[in-house]
Image (cartoon, grey):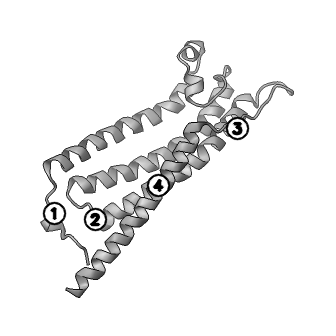
């Protein structure tokens, strides 16, 4: 039993427009995520001028082709996780745009997006560490390194992910209570 029937749901102009803007931003975010491994493969001195290495969480960009390939392959882990999160954000705002804010599909997308954000926030420092290993594994012994860093924005991402999971749980409970109450009428 669904609280708001799909046929009765008519999204407001602003909700529909907001959903479209978010979906456009999701597409842009997906494109930027897909560019990351390409940037690592094309890494050269001119890219380091723009700070691409620090943007990707690396102390420097790989200089040899094998290092670029290893680093790009490891970068596919967070890219894949980010694309998974964006897929569910797309689904969520697709439902919002159709006026099904409290529907089961929207709830499922919110829960999956929230958990994906939290898990990504926890795993990104480790992924950056693996990328530094992939970067330096071809160096001579004594020059190889593992760099794991946790920045303030990592803590903020973890907090944001935890808040999203809490909101998703509250929304699920509210939907369950609404369905229970609708059964009594």
Residue bearing mark 3: 148
Cα gap from disc 4 to disc 1, whole angstroms? 27 Å
**Nearest the eye: 139 or 28:** 28
Cα gap from disc 3 to disc 2, whole angstroms? 40 Å
Image side of residue 90 versus residue 69, left or right: left
Q: Secondary structure at mark 4?
A: helix
Image side of residue 145 versus residue 173, left or right: right
Q: Nearer the observer, disc 4 or disc 1?
A: 4
Residue 109 x, y percent position in the rendering? 38, 59
Image side of residue 147 versus residue 7, left or right: right
Q: Residue at x 38, y 58 (%)?
A: 110
Residue bearing mark 4: 163
Image side of residue 6 versus residue 38, left or right: left
User: Which quadrant holds the N terminus?
Assistant: bottom left
Q: Residue at x 75, y 35 (%)?
A: 146
Whichever of labels 2 and 4 marks the residue nearer the N terminus, that label is 2
Whichever of labels 3 and 2 marks the residue nearer the N terminus, that label is 2
Cα gap from disc 3 to disc 1, whole angstroms? 48 Å
Residue lying at the far right in this picture: please name it.
142
Cα gap from disc 3 to disc 4, whole angstroms? 25 Å
Residue 27 position by quadrant:
top left
Whichever of labels 4 and 1 marks the residue nearer the N terminus, that label is 1
Pointer 3 local density, CA inside 10 Å: few below 14, some 14–19, many at least 20: some
Residue bearing mark 1: 9
Residue bearing mark 2: 102
Cα gap from disc 1 to disc 2, whole angstroms? 10 Å
Pointer 1 local density, CA inside 10 Å: few below 14, some 14–19, many at least 20: few
């Amino acid at each position: 039993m669904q609280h708001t029937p799909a046929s009765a749901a008519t999204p407001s102009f602003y909700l529909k427009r907001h959903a479209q803007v978010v979906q456009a931003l999701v597409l842009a975010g997906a494109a930027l995520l897909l560019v990351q491994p390409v940037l690592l493969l094309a890494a050269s001195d001119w890219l380091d001028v723009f700070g691409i290495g620090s943007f990707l969480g690396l102390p420097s960009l790989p200089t040899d082709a094998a290092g670029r390939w290893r680093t790009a392959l490891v970068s596919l882990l967070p890219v894949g996780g980010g694309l998974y999160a964006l897929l569910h954000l797309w689904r969520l705002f697709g439902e919002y745009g159709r006026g099904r804010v409290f529907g089961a599909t929207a709830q499922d997308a919110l829960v999956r997006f929230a958990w994906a954000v939290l898990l990504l926030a926890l795993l990104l420092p480790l992924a950056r560490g693996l990328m530094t290993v992939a970067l330096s594994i071809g160096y001579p012994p004594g020059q190889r390194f593992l760099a794991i860093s946790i920045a303030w924005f990592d803590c903020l991402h973890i907090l944001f992910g935890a808040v999203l999971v809490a909101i998703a749980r509250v929304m699920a409970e509210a939907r369950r209570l609404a369905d229970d109450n609708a059964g009594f009428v």
